[in-house]
Image (cartoon, rainbow, N blue to C red):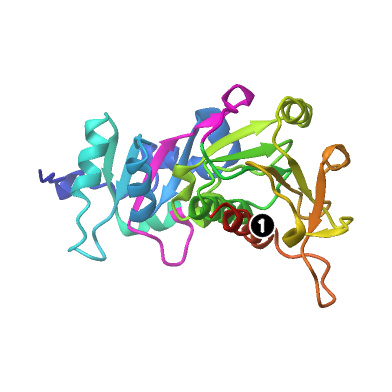
C-alpha cells in the first residue's frame, strides 16, 4: 500500500503547534508530563514497531533523498491511529539538534515497569544499575544488553532519564527490546533477599577479579554510579565483590565498557 501526502499538507513552520509539542519532548519535564519520548532514525523506528511499540507520531522529510520510502512505517503508524507529519528538513534539524539529522523521527509512549514486574524473563542474568547518571552510558548498556540477551534492566534510585534523546540515540534502537524497571534502593534489597540468585557487585574494594567469580545460576549483577560506585547498602549485601584488572594508572573503566565485559563473561560461562 502506498501513502501519498500532498506537498500542500507539508508543514513548513517550526511554530506549528504539533511541531512545538513534539519539540517540547526534548525536555525531561515534558517527557514526564506526557509519558512520551522521541526516537530518531529509520532503524530506531523499525525496531520500535518490530517490538510492538506503536508510534503516536511519525515525522519525516523526503527533501534530501527522494528515493527514501517510509510507506511501511507510515502504514503501521496510521494502522494504530498514529499521526503522520510530512515536514521540511529544516524542521527535522530543529527537533533533532544534530548537525546531520536523520530524515524520520518517531514519538512513542514510555514503558516503565515497577517491582511488581520483576519476574523471570529467561535471560542469563539480572542487570541492575545503581544511580547511573550519564544517558550515553545507559543507552550503550541497553545496546550491549540486547547483544547478550539481557531482557530486563533494573534502574536503582535516582538515575538519568532512560528516554532522553541521548540515551535513545546511544541505544541504536535496543531500548525497544529492553524492559526498563525503576525501583528504590530499599525495594531492590528486599527483592534480592527474597531470591536465591547470587548478588554480585562490582567494587574497587574487591579482592577478586571477574574471571575468578563463580556466577551461579542467573546472577544479579549490580553496576554502580560513574563517580561513587555502588551504594554501601548494596555492597554490604553482596555475596561476591568483583573488579576488573587494571595494569596502568587508571583505577576503572567507563561504565558501559565495564558492563559489557562482565556481561560477556557471564555469557561465556553459560555456553
Residue occupying image coordinates x 36% and y 55%: 43
Question: Looking at the picture, how far across and down is residue 106, in whole percent?
Answer: 37, 44
- The one nearer the camera, 29 or 55, is 55
Query: Magenta segment: does it hold 178?
Result: no
Left or right, 43 with respect to 154, comes to left
Residue occupying image coordinates x 61% and y 42%: 161
Q: Against 202, is 218 above or below?
A: above
Residue occupying image coordinates x 79% and y 27%: 186
Left or right, 167 with respect to 3, comes to right
Query: Magenta segment: does it hold 109?
Result: yes
Q: Quadrant of the N terminus?
A: top left
For label 1, the residue is 262
Question: Looking at the picture, how far across and down is residue 97, in whole percent?
Answer: 48, 58
Question: Looking at the picture, how far across and down is residue 191, in whole percent?
Answer: 72, 27
Residue occupying image coordinates x 57% and y 45%: 124
- The one nearer the camera, 30 or 72, is 72
Q: Against 174, is 21 above or below?
A: above
- Residue interval drawn in magenta: 96-121
Residue closest to the far bottom: 248
Question: Looking at the picture, how far across and down is residue 71, in whole percent?
Answer: 18, 48
Q: Quadrant of residue 177?
A: top left
- The one nearer the camera, 60 or 78, is 78
Amino acid at each position: 500500500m502506498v501513502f501519498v501526502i500532498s506537498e500542500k499538507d507539508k508543514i513548513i513552520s517550526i511554530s506549528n503547534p504539533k511541531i512545538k509539542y513534539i519539540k517540547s519532548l526534548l525536555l525531561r519535564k515534558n517527557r514526564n508530563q506526557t509519558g512520551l519520548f522521541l526516537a530518531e532514525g529509520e532503524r530506531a523506528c523499525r525496531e520500535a514497531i518490530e517490538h510492538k511499540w506503536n508510534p503516536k507520531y511519525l515525522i519525516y522529510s523526503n527533501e534530501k533523498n527522494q528515493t527514501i520510502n517510509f510507506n511501511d512505517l507510515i502504514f503501521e503508524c496510521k494502522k494504530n491511529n498514529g499521526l503522520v507529519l510530512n515536514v521540511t528538513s529544516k524542521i527535522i534539524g530543529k527537533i533533532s539538534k544534530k548537525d546531520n539529522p536523520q530524515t524520520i523521527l518517531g514519538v512513542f509512549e514510555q514503558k516503565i515497569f515497577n517491582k511488581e514486574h520483576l519476574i523471570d524473563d529467561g535471560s542469563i542474568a539480572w542487570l541492575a544499575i545503581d544511580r547511573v547518571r550519564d544517558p550515553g552510558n545507559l543507552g550503550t548498556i541497553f545496546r550491549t544488553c540486547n547483544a547478550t540477551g539481557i531482557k530486563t534492566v533494573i534502574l536503582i534510585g535516582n538515575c538519568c532519564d532512560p528516554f532522553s534523546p541521548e540515551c535513545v540515540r546511544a541505544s541504536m534502537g535496543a531500548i525497544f527490546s529492553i524492559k526498563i524497571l525503576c525501583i528504590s534502593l530499599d525495594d531492590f534489597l528486599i527483592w534480592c533477599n527474597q531470591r536465591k540468585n547470587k548478588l554480585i557487585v562490582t567494587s574497587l574494594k574487591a579482592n577478586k577479579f571477574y574471571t575468578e567469580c563463580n556466577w551461579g545460576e542467573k546472577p544479579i549483577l549490580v553496576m554502580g554510579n560513574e563517580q561513587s560506585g555502588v551504594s554501601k547498602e548494596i555492597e554490604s549485601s553482596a555475596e561476591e565483590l568483583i573488579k576488573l584488572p587494571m595494569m596502568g594508572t587508571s583505577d576503572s573503566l567507563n561504565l558501559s565498557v565495564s558492563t559489557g565485559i562482565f556481561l560477556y563473561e557471564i555469557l561465556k560461562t553459560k555456553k
